[in-house]
Image: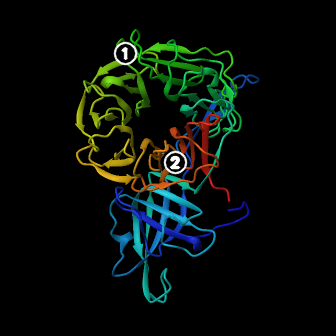
Amino acid sequence: MGQNDLINSSQASVFVQTDPAEPYVWLSCAGAGDLSIPAGERTVVYRPNPKQSGKMQIWDYIEGTEGAPTLRLTNPFTNVINFLLEQKCRFQVRINYACAGDRPNTITSYTVSDLLVEGLPGTRGKGPSALGGGTTGAGTMVDTNAELQGLGYSLLYPLQTSRLTLASLTSVGSLVFVPEQCRSACRAVVNLGCIGYVFPAAAVYGYQQKTVDCGTTWNATAWQPFTIAGNDVSSSLTVEIATGYRVIVAGNLVDPLEPPEISYVDVVSGVNPTDAGLVAVNIWVGTVVNQGIHMLTRATDGTIWAAGTNGYIWYSKTLGVSWTTIATGAGQTFNDVAFLDDRRGFAVGNSNTFWYTADGATWAAAVGPAPACNLLTIAINRFGHIFVGDNAAQIWRTIDYGTTWEMLVDLGTGNVNRIRFDPNLAYVGYALYNNATPVGYLYRSEDGGVTWAQQVNPTGSNSGYNDLFVCDPNMVYVGGEPHPLGGTSYVAKWIRKSA
């Protein structure tokens, strides 16, 4: 779309997903009315007026969360489809708009989509019969309608991509971005996907890079993590603190004399392009030596969890300052860990290792999906469906917490080494696939993980993808291996298509 192009309701097609484990289906010739998203309530903050005793000033406001979105749907009443009158449970609604061509009943043809998740029918009704009336304009039809209230909303766009320019030469093992935030008296504005870090998979920390302009330029950071020489950054995350944000990195080097190590730095000013003047704080994780950390994640209560070698899992309730060790007894390497809420978590590892916890304290083994395979990544969507990628290029799903498994994708050879969902809806998913060459590819799911589609790679070659960071449903960063013949550090960005 150009900036002056318009789309309207006559170019729309409506699809519904009544079962989050199944694909969308076309809802006949349904019509969509206004989609409303109530703004969050604003509470005014006062302060004393320094120039008038006993008077106050309106100085700021506290903005609440946006309300539940609402949508009105209209559908013709026939002896086959009485969907809006009969649907009693939550469902997803997707409205595709196309700028040109016909209005197809294929969900992959769109210029922009409205996505309403977990819509619940409210007031419903039907109009009088009219010859030649109704949405289809043919025969005697009765229009039914329903007001839906959803738990989440997003615009969805096709993506375009580009490779970003970095001066460093090492492979990218991990990358992380600071969440967007509005300007306030306490902090500067942070735009979506604009402040981020990439960390080398090789221990050359002069090449640790930071961007403050959404990936346009990158600079080497002044702080260097880890006490152990040669430790590699295997995983990274950011957490909000009172003065700004904390960048936490984990090391995967197994040292015979020291326990695993994490490192963090607190950044007050996000616009400092090199974090000049900041010194990393290095922390030993537990006391058991000969261990390395492979992945960091956060549960819904803010607890940071780490998973690594020999079946060890650690957690921190102090934003990385202190850690508690859990020896699960798995004996196998854990490659990834994910939490559904503050208590229920799952970890995957080599040799089909799949472990779970119902309380965060005790872990037990369950049956993984792929015998003789290494499970490399795990992610959980908003419905509690668990997705696992392995070193046989497969994506698996369980909707009953591991009791049964279903293979969703089989790409032949290679590995699926990352699966992640968008941080707000936990509905739009992304996966990294490296073929046997290796060449890396990005896959996207627009239906909660049911189906996955390959995205176009940026111009220029890569030698495999290592990590991804999902900013929102329409913005993703990927880090990987530079081309072996003199390539620079590989970082690519996918954003909404502009034309």
Counting from the top left corner in percent of width and height, residue 303 is at: 41, 27
Q: CA distance from mark 1 to mark 2?
A: 34 Å
Q: Is residue 354 left or right of residue 224?
A: left
Give the residue furthest to the right. 51
Counting from the top left corner in percent of width and height, residue 445 is at: 46, 53
Q: In which quarter of the view is residue 191 placed?
A: top right
Labels 1 and 2 touching (C-beta < 8 A): no
Residue at point 42% right, 27% down? 294
Counting from the top left corner in percent of width and height, residue 52 is at: 75, 24
Residue hosting label 1: 290
Q: Is residue 499 left or right of residue 424?
A: right
Q: Is residue 73 left or right of residue 52?
A: left
SS at circle 1 = loop
Image quarter hosting the N terminus: bottom right
Crowd band around label 2 with a 10 angstrom C-alpha radius: few (<14), some (14–19), many (20+)? many
Counting from the top left corner in percent of width and height, residue 362 is at: 25, 26
SS at circle 2 = strand
Q: Amino acid at mark 1?
A: Asn
Q: Is residue 4 left or right of residue 230?
A: right
Of 23 and 167, nearer the camera is 167
Residue at point 45% right, 20% down? 253
Of 17 and 284, nearer the camera is 284
